[in-house]
Image (cartoon, coloured by chain):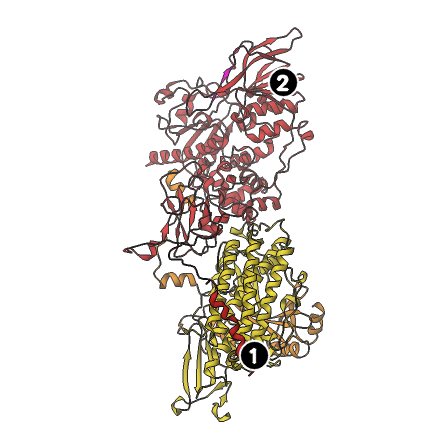
Amino acid sequence: MKQLDTELSKQFTLSDYVEQRPELAFVTVEKQQLVPLLTYLRDTKKYTHLVTLTAVDWLEVNQFQLTYLLHNYETHTDIGIRVKLDRDNPVMETIHHLWEQARVYQRELHEMFGIDFPGSPGVEEPMILEGWQGPPVMRRDFDTAKYSLETYDHRKRDTREPEIYMKEKLYPED
Amino acid sequence: MKLKDILSPFYVWKRAFEKPYSINTLTELRPGSPTYRGFHKNDVSKCIGCGSCAEICQNITIDMVPVSETKDGDSGLRPRFDYGLCCWCALCVDICPTGSLTMSNAYTWVEEGLDKDVRETYCFTPGVDEKHWENEELGYHRPDEYELLHLNRLPMPHLPTEERITSFIEMVKGYSREQAVKEADRCIQCGICTATCPAHMNIPAYIKAIREDNIEEGLRIMYETNPLPGVCGRVCTRRCEDVCALSHRGEAISIRWLKRYLSDSVEGEKYNQILASEIKPQNKTVAIIGAGPGGLSAAYYLLKMGYSVEIFEQNKAAGGMLRYGIPEYRLPYDAMDKDINYIVSLGAKLHYNTKVGKDISFDELHARFDSVFISTGLFEASKLAIEGETLPGVLYGLNFLEDVTHGKIPELGKKVLVIGGGNVAMDAARTARRLGADVVVIYRRREIDMPADHEEIEEGYEENIEFHFQAIPMKIEQTADNRLEFIWGNAEMKQLEEGKRPVPVMIEGSRESIIADTIISAVGQSTNYHWMEGEAIANIKFGKWTIEADRWGKSSDPKVFVGGDIFNRVADAISAIADGHRSARAIDSFLQSQTE
Amino acid sequence: MSDKYPPIVNGKSVYDLESGKYLKMWQGPQHPGVTGNMSLELIISGDQIVDCKTHVGYLHRGFEKLMERRRYINCFPIVCRICVPEPDTNEYLFAAAMEDLMGIEVPERAKWLRTLNMELSRLASFLMWIGGQSGAFGHGTVAQWALAHRDFVLDLFEEWTGARIYHMYTTPGGVRGGTPEGWDNHVERVLQGVEKFLTEVNHVMFNNAVFKSRAVGLGIIAPDMIDRFGVVGPVARGSGIVRDTRKDNPYLIYDQLDFNIETETAGDVYARAMVRWKEMHQAISLIRQIIKRMPRTGPLHITLPNVLHLKVPAGETYVRAESTRGEYGYYMVSDGTIYPRKITVRGPSYSHAMALLEHLAVGVNIADTHGLMLSLHTYPPEIER
């Protein structure tokens, strides 16, 4: 895998190479170079299978990480390509022309993270959360537990911490 | 279309003559499999209400609710399950440290006439609310090969026995960072230990600090309730470990060694900086009689509250029984001095070699100071009360240990007998062993009755100390060659009173003897109040052994407070420290009320 | 026929419902022919589909979000619920991803038991599928037999793991217990029943004129579509693609077992059904091999550091396994805290039921949509997680 990284580095600006297992590596690429890199990997390096496309929210550094995971059926190796997006303006080029199913992934990311993929067919249609008005739910600053407690009527919890309860019961004065 | 494809499906017509697969579940209830994860059961006699089940539940199914029946080391809470939320993963059963929580193979619960909120309907406290599956044997139990908890503690490195018996170097080496973090990781943070600790130290919090490698925070947490953590980290009687949730199926967390690790990990010079707090000076003074753990603890908290503190100590150094009772190999002087020096550095004024009643009168203290805290400790050894006790070569454990501390090593000879089964007896025996003698310990009751720390007994065996149990001392005689003959009778244990511990009763006509060079008696300690004279004691009420006081140590004279071994019946360092802390707060509120 | 179809602009069909030429029809989310809770928005002309859109979200429980707010051990009871008929793949992959990040190797015996668990659940999942596939073409009887046999397999799970549907057996660090005494004989009895059933299925379904006439030639997936649509598993193997994660990237103890990759070449519904029928025999053979050869003694589980405050080292990983629908994967990102940063579940149904089905459905008779959908063997919960 290291060899592939070296080879790719000649043409693309890559960083943060991590080899998790002999057959699995991750690498970060510049945003502008992603589509050329994926096309190159698919057409020349036989990474023909788009395994998944997903996003990770790094709220602390105000970034979204997109991970494009590709698989090579001949060498049975995987490479994960990371792209960092500005969280305030998350826009990424679409890859639906490379893989048909990518438009579904992109539609989901648009709905769940608010990442836009201009040109991806139906990217703005709601997929899972039809009628949802709030912020994109998979963003880390959306607190689902808080939302649920505020929105729905739950049974009131009636629990105690042993340590605090024992203090109240056994030695309230100390 | 082939003819075969039309005929082939008729092959299965024979099915019409076979027995159907379906079973009638309306008339015959199908029981769950023997390991089925059905409704919960809880053996409440084993449950300690530690709340681990509620902690691991991913779906807030479990609420901890109070019950009326509790026992020692039991929070008095029991898990209540909400089957509207339960996902039957049984992690609660797997994590249960006592093994009280299991599951039955029952899976039907029919409720009729629903007139209450459905969210409250399928909730119950297993073992408390009666259900038809309560005595069901079958159902999920944690499989033997599968365990979520680390039940065994990390072994503490010790000096090898050969090295131990020839020196007074501290025998317990202490945990390394890696070991401490690993041991701290075992903790489930239930907090049951906190209630049992006399000082109510926030044990889970400082263990968490160790786990997160936040030593300074850990030190601060310890000092909130205990200003002698380096001492307690070595010699605490650690009743917290007796109730540790993990001790029910495995070994308790090494709470004492973890405390020691925290204290050892910070250099003494840094204490001032780490524990710095804003001190508001108060224009009041407090006298403390006795610089043992009780007095030092009171001094620390009073100093932090801004009072001026003077401590009167009859010996030439502070520490009391910690210094003069506990041998160096268990509690090295530099470790103790680290704790004491920090207290002194806060501004405590220590008067060494000053015995109240002789060098300064109690009257004077009472008049000069706004409040007096008495923690003199049990400094008198109890008598054996047998013939020959006054012969030369018969020593008392307390005096013997004190002499060793002072560097006055008595001539013990080759063979030493130690009479008694408490910690002082063990300290005396093991000290004598280190001085080169062969040691025999003689105790009235059985081994399991020994009040000494079981670890010390074990280590005594390792150091080749001999034990004779159920031996009642009769007399001591001097032999012709100036040695001592100790004569005892064998006893049998009899249950004389229901509910009390059995008593040793001498077997008629039994007589055994052993020849030794020195006999050390360590059968108990007491105190006296002869030093308290004068007008100042007029308002103080004395009990049979003690000064009468409320739980805050406040005597009938509002100015005078007591604490430590002379006040609590437990007589260990941590109880004295707790007394000191408690009395410091009582003294504070008394002095505040004086100002107003 | 070509004027039947509306023009496509920007990847979307443009049709005028007012023209009277097209009719919009919904199938699902509550429809006996639709797998699970999803719905198809069909535009039909006559009885032929001219445009299809899949709608999901009826089973959305937000697992990926829930897992970001739970300790690792608390994710363990959740993951199995991502796929109801075959939960064990999820359990294994969640555990495997964690173990990979932590650098843990599970005991040998646990590996065998995990494999056995996955193969048994493969059988249960295929039995569920065969019920649906036959039912979709009107063979209700086969469906009932299939589900009866599936229940016998679930009985085995109940006896072994303590639960029928969500077994929660593969825990991070190993498995939760050994097999009970006498269980092997029960397995053999059930397997013989399933084998007999499969013979009958061969007669009554695969050699049935009705089934053949409907399934042959329906929903053909050409080999060139495989990578373009991300097609995996039996669906790909039905088009002659020789790929199987168990062989290509062996995990657990699959490299010690004796089996071949089963394929068909036609690429239609019939071929995919045939592949699955063969794989059921394969699963039976694998279960027998495992039961015969697996170690009966030895550790089952290694105790992780205290699970109540377990931190997984920072990093990211992807693990995969072959489920009944094809490659199933977990992408796990840890930031070194007690909570996972992100877990993405890659369910094979994701690409099959959305992009691929929408493509394949065009031109199909509405009566055949269910059969087509079932032939892709989709489970909606793994789409919406």
Q: What stretch is highlighted in magenta?
A: B500-510
Q: Return the x and y of residue A87 as percentages of the image width and height.
A: 51, 70
Q: Which corner quadrant holds the C terminus of chain B?
A: top left
In this view, A98 is above or below B553: below
Instruction: Relative to B27, say whether B273 is above or below.
Output: above
Along the viewing direction, whichever of B589 and B453 lies nearer the viewer: B453
Kindly identify which residue carries mark 2: B416
Q: What element carries label 2?
A: strand
From what the image shows, is residue C324 above or below residue B303? below
Q: Which chain shows up in red?
A: B
Of mark 2 and mark 1, the one earlier in the sequence is: 1
Residue B214 shows in the view: no
Q: Name the residue under label 1.
A: B4
Give the image location of residue B200, x and y in percent: 45, 38
Is-magenta flag for residue C54? no
Q: Position of residue C66 (x, y in %)?
A: 47, 62
- Chain letter corresponding to the colour yellow: C
User: From the viewer's perspective, is A170 left or right of C160?
Assistant: left
| Chain A painted colour | orange
